[in-house]
Image (cartoon, rainbow, N blue to C red):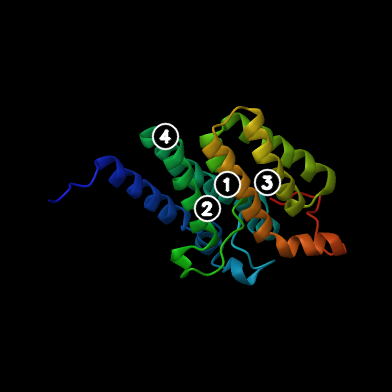
Amino acid sequence: MRFAPDLGVIVALLVVAGGYVLGSVPFGFVVPRLLRREDIRTRGSGNVGASNVWRVYGRSLGLPVALLDGAKGFAPALVGLELSGDWVGVLAGAAAMVGHARPVLLRFAKGGKMVATAGGVSLALAPFAALACLAVWLVVFALFRYASLASLATAAALPILCLAFGASWPIVGFAALACIGVAVLHRQNISRLLSGTEPRFSRAARA
């Protein structure tokens, strides 16, 4: 006897797969390539995330890349959440983050460090916690001028704030794993912070 696949399962798999594909669009690579004809991987830290784009080109490119990186986490997580509930929203968002870290469009080479994408996912799944995390990032960055430190502090705060705002256990679990993932991808930054060699962002904002 043959069993027809459940339509809900098919939809969930498509949303998760779509999350990975969307997450794999390396906006930090694409935007400077299109607008400045440069490969961001040869500039600054060589990372294709929004922080490196901002450091190299200033807010004119850094801000759009940060928003696009956030949007590619927000969209699949929200679609998954609305169509199939918390678990699919979490899996679709996590897939977008994996795609951002190892983008298929860059042949699975090292991608970004997932902070903006994780923020977008969190905004879809736990909006109040995500907004509180944004405040954490801004305060830590304003005080110390280290984007990496602000990102690590925000990642650590995310599961605590999700729990405080009453998020479901799948979302709290996602937040905890996202925190670990961000910390792992920032391990070199952590070493530089401890040794005092991590570069600060200049207070003089670039155009």
For residue 81, which quarter of the picture?
top left
Q: Nearer the viewer, mark 3 or mark 4?
A: 4
The amino acid type found where label 1 is placed reads Ala
Name the one closer to the observer, 147 or 154: 154
| Residue at 65% over, 39% down | 159
Task: Say whether residue 104 is visible.
Answer: yes
Mark toward the start of the polypeptide (3 vs 4): 4
| Residue at 66% over, 59% down | 184
| Residue at 60% over, 27% down | 166
Q: Do labels 1 and 4 touch, CB within 8 Å?
A: no
**Direction right: furthest residue:** 196
For residue 47, which quarter of the picture?
bottom right
Residue 155: numbered disc: 3
Between the residue at mark 2 and the residue at mark 4, the CA separation in whole angstroms equals 19 Å
Query: Quick check: 64 above or below 200?
Result: above
Residue 85: numbered disc: 4
Check disc 1 and report the residue beneath it. 118
Query: Quick check: 98 above or below 131?
Result: below
Mark toward the start of the polypeptide (1 vs 3): 1
The amino acid type found where label 2 is placed reads Met
Between the residue at mark 1 and the residue at mark 4, the CA separation in whole angstroms equals 18 Å
Task: Say whether residue 75 is visible.
Answer: no
Query: Quick check: 164 above or below 175?
Result: above
Q: Do labels 1 and 3 touch, CB within 8 Å?
A: yes
Q: Residues within 10 Å of mark 1 (few under 14, many from 20)?
A: many
The amino acid type found where label 3 is placed reads Ala
Q: Residues within 10 Å of mark 3 (few under 14, many from 20)?
A: many
Mark toward the start of the polypeptide (2 vs 1): 2
Locate residue 75, reporting x and y percent.
45, 41
Check disc 2 and report the residue beneath it. 97
